[in-house]
Amino acid sequence: MRKTALDCVYKLGKIDERVVFIGSDLGPGVLDKMKTEFPQRFFMEGVSEQYIVGMAAGLAMEGFIPYVNTIATFLTRRCYEQVAVDLCIHDLPVRLIANGGGGVYAPLGPTHLAIEDIAIMRALPNMAVVAPCDADEMNRLMMSTLDWPHPIYIRLGKGGDKIVSEEKNGFELGKAIIMRSGTDGMFVTTGVMTQLALETADLLKKDGVNVGIVHMHTLKPFDSSGVISAIENVRAVVTVEEHIVNGGLGSALLETCSELRPDLLSKIARVGIPDKFATEYGSQNSLLKHWGITSDTLVGAMMKKLGG
Amino acid sequence: MQMDDRSKLLRRYVIDAMRGGGRGHLGSSMSMIEILRVLYDSVLKFDPANPKSLDRDRFVLSKGHGCLALYAILADKGFFPISELESFCRPTSRLGGHPERGKVPGVEASTGALGHGLPIAVGLAIAMRLQKRNSRVFVLTGDGEINEGSNWEAGMAAAKHKLSNLTVMMDYNKLQSYGKTSEVLDLEPLVDKWKSFGFVTHEVDGHDVSALEAIFKKLPFSDSAPSAIICHTIKGKGFPFAEGNPEWHHKSGMTESDIQQMYDCL
C-alpha cells in the first residue's frame, strides 16, 4: 500500500507540475524515479516535521500540491499545531501520507504506533481523513486527490497483498462503499480492517448468519446518509477499526446516529484498540490479537448484538 | 533616537486600534514600527489594490502578536481604510488579536502560534524559485519566539536550499512575556547562532530609519545563502512607562486614561 501511494505521487507529479513530494528522512531510494526525472520537485528535508508541514503550507499557498510522507505518529503527534494552524486554518491542499496506521510498527513499540491518529486528525476542521483498505483502493484514492481543495490525511495500513476492493465501486472521497450487503448484521469498517471483516462475514455465513460490510474509507467527511442507509435495516452493527475506540470510526458512527438516528444506537457495538498504549511488541497480528481485534472477537461482538 | 512624524503617526494608528479593542500587545508592536515602516516604504514590492498580485514580495509576520503594527502600516498603505483600525478585536472585525490570511488584505499567513512563520517562508521562497519569480520573501520573528525549535529546523533548511531570496528579521527587544530573554532562555550568542545556521547575518538599530534603509539596500547579503538581520529594538518604544517594561507586553481592559496617556507621549 505504501509503495502504491508513493508510486502514485510519481505518477501525479508526471501529469501535474503542481505536485511536489516532501519526505522527512525516509529509507534510501524512496521515489528515486521522481528524484531523477524532476528533482526540483523532490524534497528530502530531514527529521524536522514541524518545519516540513510549514514548508508544505508555504508551497501550497503559492499553488503547489505537496504530498508529505513520513511515519504516522510523527506526522500527527509531533507537528499537530503545524497541521492545525499551517494546514487546516489556512485550508490548504496538502496531502499527508502517514505510514503505519495502527499496529504496523508493532516491534517498535508505542512511540511508533499510530493508535489515535484518526481521532486527532478528525478533530481538525477542514481536514479530510482517509484510510483505504488495500493497494488498489489506495491507487484510486491517490489519483483522485489532485483537485480536492483542502488538506487530506491519508492513513496507510498494512494488510498484506490481498486485494478486496473492486474497481466497479470506484472511489469518491466522502462516499461509503457497501462491499457486501447483509440481512442480519453489518460490519462498519475502515482501512485494512475491511479485509478482516470480509473474512469474518464469510465465517458467519457458514453458520447461516448473513452479515454485510460497509467500508468507510473516508472517516471525514463522514458519509452519514450512506452509512445510515446501510445499517438501518439490520439488527446488529459492529464497527471495526485498527485504532483506539475513542474518537475513531466507532465514535463517528455513534455521533452520527446520536444526532440523526438515535433509534439505531442500541444495536451498535465497537471493536477497536483499548484505551491504553501498547504494552507488547511482536507483530501486527500478535498485537491485533492482544487488542482483541480478531475474527473471533468480531463474531462474538456480532452474535452478542444479534442476541445469539 | 527621536521619532519623526511618520513614526509617531504609525504609533498613533496602533493606539487608535487599541482604543477600539480595549486591548493589545503594545510593547511587542511598538518595537517593530520602524522595521515595518522601512520595509513597506522602501523595500517591499506590493500593490494595495491587488494584494495577491503574483509578483509581489511576501512578508510574513511570524510574531503575530505584533499585528497592531502590521495593521497600522497596511492601513497607512491603503490595504484597508484607516478608520477600520478602531474595529480591532470586535466580534465581526477583520482585525483580530492575531493576523489572519484571507481576512486581512496584505496578510500572507495566519500567525499567532509562534515558530510558524519561518517554516512557511521557506516554503514560499522555494515556491518563488520553482516558479522562476523574482519575488522576495521576508519574515519577522520575535526574540522570545525563536525559543521554538521549529525556527531552527527551518533555518537549517533555508541554508541547505541556499535561499538567497529569503530574509529573516528579528525584533530583538530583549524582553519576552515573563521577563528578560537573557533570563528566561538566553539567545546569545545570537549573531553567531544565525551565522552557524548558514545565514549571512547583520545587526542594525531597529529604530534607526536610515540604518534600516541602508541594511535593506544590501540585500541579498549573499547570492547563495539566506540573509538574517538582527534588529536591536526597545520594547514599547516611544512610551516611557512601557519601554522595557514586561507589564506592557500585552494589556487588556484598558481605560480611557490609559489610552490618553499613550496619545500624550506622541
Image: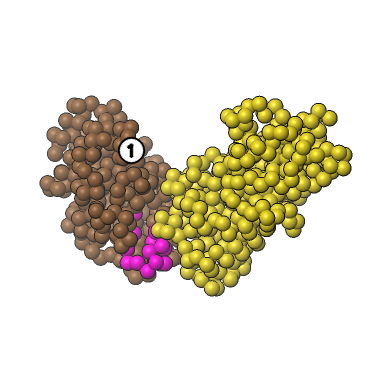
Q: Quadrant of residue A70?
A: bottom right
Indicate yes or no whether the magenta region holds residue A131.
no
Indicate yes or no whether the magenta region holds residue B134.
yes
Q: Quadrant of residue B161?
A: bottom left
Q: Amino acid at mark 1?
A: Gly
Q: Is residue B210 placed above or below A187 in the rendered structure? A: below
Residue B206 or residue A117, whichever sits in front = A117
Q: Is residue A159 placed above or below A42 in the rendered structure? A: above
- At a point 27% along the width and 32% down the height, the residue shown is B21
Which chain is painted in yellow? A
Looking at the picture, how far across and down is residue A20, in whole percent? 50, 62
In the picture, the quarter occupied by the N terminus of chain A is: bottom right
User: For mark 1, what is the residue?
Assistant: B97
Q: How is the image coloured?
A: by chain
Looking at the picture, how far across and down is residue B143, in whole percent? 35, 47
- At a point 70% along the width and 38% down the height, the residue shown is A239
Looking at the picture, how far across and down is residue B190, in whole percent? 36, 54
In the picture, the quarter occupied by the C terminus of chain A is: top right
